[in-house]
Amino acid sequence: MTAVIVERLVDWQDTDAAGHYHHSTVIRWVEAAEAALLEARGLRWLFGTIPRVRYEVDYLDRLWFGDTASIELTVGKIGRSSVRYDFVIRRIAAEHGLDDAVARTVAARGALTAVYAPDSQGGARPWPTDTAAALGGESASETAGADTKTIALQPTPILEV
């Protein structure tokens, strides 16, 4: 299974007036994890060629300003011309450390489906064989068990002027 885990600090702009994360934050985090996964698989060139056709999410717990969101994105299914990413977002409470497993709860889970459409006029096309293989975790340079990578992304620094 091809997977990536991205950890993000829940920043002020990720929250709404109630103080917890805004529903639209999830898609940004999922797409950040997708970018990390595609980069790690050598598939950066796919940006701009894989429009989204379906997105679903179950919101299960709140994330608050200062919490850490752990976004796990996996390639759930590779179709003839589509990819379904499955994701789980876990809350790591700010008052607990990153190593405190008790503090981790599932905040959201869902799926994002995209299709390979390399030109804007032609619609979806079958994946190139090597691209489908890379999305599926096949690579001559990889070793077994090295399919999941954890990346810690920090919030954008705000500079005082």
Image: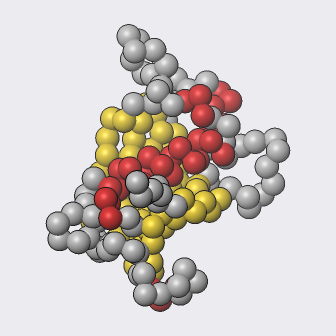
In-front residue for pair 43/133: 43
In-front residue for pair 157/12: 157
Q: Where is residue 122 in the image (x, y as percent from the top left)?
A: 41, 12
Give the side of residue 135 with respect to residue 121, left or right.
Answer: right
Q: Which residue is found at the position 60% from the left and 60% from the top?
A: 151
Quadrant position of the N terminus in the picture? bottom right
In-front residue for pair 131/97: 97
Q: Position of residue 82 (x, y in %)?
A: 46, 34
Please count the marks in the image.
0
Give the side of residue 147 with respect to residue 71, left or right.
Answer: right
Q: Which residue is found at the position 38% from the left and 64% from the top?
A: 11
Q: In this view, does 79 lie above or below 121?
A: below
Q: Which residue lies furthest to the left in this view?
A: 17
> From this viewpoint, is residue 6 visible?
no
Give the side of residue 109 with respect to residue 155, left or right.
Answer: left
Q: Which residue is found at the position 78% from the left and 57% from the top?
A: 144
Q: Is residue 68 above or below residue 118?
A: below
Tell me the quarter of the picture where residue 26 sits.
Answer: bottom left
In-front residue for pair 59/92: 92
Its colouring scheme is: secondary structure
Q: Position of residue 40 (x, y in %)?
A: 66, 45
